[in-house]
Image (spheres, rainbow, N blue to C red):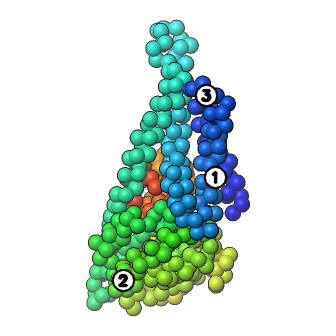
Amino acid sequence: MNFVIVTFLLVYGSLHLHFFLRLRAAFAIGALSQALLVVLLLLGLLTPIIVRIAEGYHWETLARWFAWTGYLWMALLFLFFIGALLVDLYRFVVWLAGRFPVADLAAWRLQARTVFLLPLAAALALTGYGYYEAGQIRTERLEIRSEKIPRDLGPLRIVQISDVHVGVIVRGERLERMLRAVREAKPDLLVSTGDLVDGQGDGLAEAVPRLREIRPRFGKYAVTGNHEFYIGLDHALDFMRQAGFVTLRNETATIAGAITLAGVDDPTIRPFAPRGRLSDREVLAAGEGRFKILLKHQPFVEPDAPGAFDLQLSGHTHRGQIFPFGWITGRVFKYHSGTYRLNGGALLHVSRGTGTWGPPVRFLSPPQITVIDLIPE
């Protein structure tokens, strides 16, 4: 955990330093203005820590103010960095062309202020659009026909939500938009594949009744994600229980007497799991002959797991959440987003996520709920 925090601060701090140097190169700012800018940038850097501390002391207004301003700044800063890299690439091409005296390229060279203001303007525009996109919930559909689904059960509809991150930002109307999409899908079963909760403040108490109102006929089930561990496992489990979810922690449940639903703890939490470290195949051992669904936060497939389940539902990746960060997460996760067919005919579906972590912004990675219709073959 400490390693993760230190790494984050080093990387995020480098982005702040880059912004400071770019701004100073573009404008002649005095010593006092530079000192004020450094203070503001330090507050931006420390926003995630400040928000957690404020939540812990129930300073709700302070936590929300820092979350909204600090996390929007995070998105803006990341997009500014990408834009600045593209501007630098353009400048390099112009410089390289200037090594060959075939034309006067003076008009193509950018002034220092333009070098700063151009990516800043682009970042502001894209952050605004990304804020809009984060509220546009998509409904992705997956139809699975199987002879393991009894005919007398008929079609069974599962709705998957993932990475909702209920907390200081995802609450109120933002949460209601997600739940409205769930209600409109009319699920028989609702599952959450981790990171349902990501806060400690008063917003959780507000979210509980909204989630409890959704009562599918076969219930609601959830598994832990890494953020349930970060905010406090007992606290997160209590929230999920109050919200009406049964949390599967390396255990199974039988749905309608015909489906085995298994859930495993996120690797972050597994050392603290009640049944110790079990493989996915061991958790799935019960319920032979039934259609088996594995709920697992991170989209990793254990080598011996294919064949032990028919469908794995995962999330975690957000598909990068803000392009082009998805290029990085796509290198880390073999199964990044969408539906994959595994060895033995099993399917793996990786959700882009329903909410947002950190910035309330998504760019070229719209949020989703997934509707899975299980139909008798």
Asked if 147 appears above or below 144 in the picture, the reply is: below
x%, y% of residue 77?
Answer: 54, 43
Which one is nearer the viewer's eye here, 337 or 287? 337
Residue drawn at (55%, 84%) of the image: 251
Residue named by callout 2: 215
Q: Quadrant of the N terminus?
A: bottom right
Q: CA distance from mark 1 to mark 3?
A: 24 Å
Q: CA distance from mark 3 to mark 2?
A: 58 Å
Residue named by callout 3: 29
Residue 242 visible in the shown view: yes
Under circle 1, the secondary element is loop
Query: Which circle's residue, 2 or 1, is located before the other in the chain?
Result: 1
Residue drawn at (36%, 68%) of the image: 176
Query: Which circle's residue, 1 or 3, is located before the other in the chain?
Result: 3
Residue 140 visible in the shown view: no
Circle number at residue 46 = 1
Under circle 3, the secondary element is loop
Q: CA distance from mark 2 to mark 1?
A: 39 Å
Which one is nearer the viewer's eye here, 92 or 67? 67
Q: Residues within 10 Å of mark 2 (few under 14, many from 20)?
A: some
Residue 69 lies left or right of residue 34; in this view the side is left
Q: Residues within 10 Å of mark 1 (few under 14, many from 20)?
A: some
Q: What residue type is disc 2 on?
A: Arg
Residue drawn at (34%, 57%) of the image: 136
Q: What residue type is disc 1 on?
A: Leu
